Amino acid sequence: MKQKKSRQGIRIRRVRTPDGKNVMRYDKEKPDRSICARCGAILQGVPRDIPSKVRRMTKSKRRVGRKYGGVLCNNCVVEVEKYKTRMEDGFAVRRDLTIEKYLPVGWFSSLPEAVQEASRKVVAARKVELAISEEVAEELGKPKHRKEKVPESLIEAEASSKEVEAPSEEAKAEKPKKKSKAKAKE
């Protein structure tokens, strides 16, 4: 007996030829669309074709010619470049590791020491702000992270008011049972 051929990644379709025959065509399935590595948006200008055809294309047809072409969408490229220039110019910006992932390795350590120190101060100031806000919330009796804590006495009171007594066995026995249609006809 002949072993069946694997059909994974192959689309089978029925085609009618010009001479009137019905023929089965086996086409390779196209892969999913390329998406941005940072935000997940569909990349424009990147072909959606089987790998053997993509390899035969010229490099300019395979991906977009700008920085990070074929990896990041245009919006993310703009964000990466803004972040990079702000950090290099010395603006006090909090480090964003989702963006730094796409910059060269050791990029932050190559920045001037003053810029690195300013970034560390911004992070430290943010940590202090969070700690102070939590302390103030505790002093005022407000719960942290906007989750309200309900006193247990209220929970118990609500539970007892909502409890419904289960019917006793005597009450169950008193209810008449419905007769089936077959017995009703007799």
Image (cartoon, rainbow, N blue to C red):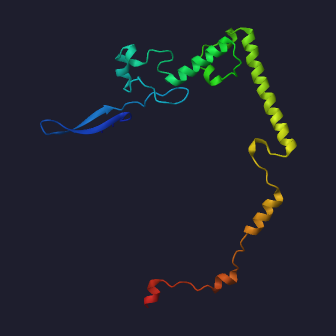
Camera-side residue of 138 and 140: 140
Is 90 placed left or right of 48 in the picture?
right
Is 111 placed left or right of 44 in the picture?
right
Above or below residue 92? Residue 26 is below
Task: Tally the marks.
Answer: 0
Query: From this viewpoint, which residue is outermost toward the bottom?
Result: 186
- Residue at 85 percent across and 37 percent down: it is 135
Could one spot residue 99 in this view of the protein? yes
Is 16 placed left or right of 186 in the picture?
left
Q: Position of residue 31 (x, y in %)?
A: 40, 30
Camera-side residue of 183 and 15: 15
Q: Quadrant of residue 16?
A: top left
Above or below residue 114? Residue 4 is below
Q: Position of residue 148 (x, y in %)?
A: 77, 49
Above or below residue 186? Residue 103 is above
Q: Position of residue 108 (x, y in %)?
A: 67, 13
Above or below residue 79? Residue 166 is below
- Residue at 68 percent across and 9 percent down: it is 110
Q: Quadrant of the C terminus?
A: bottom left
Camera-side residue of 126 and 52: 126
Q: Quadrant of the N terminus?
A: top left
- Residue at 15 percent across and 39 percent down: it is 21
- Residue at 79 percent across and 54 percent down: it is 150
Query: From this viewpoint, which residue is outermost toward the right?
Result: 139
Q: Position of residue 103 (x, y in %)?
A: 60, 16
Could one spot residue 2 in this view of the protein? no
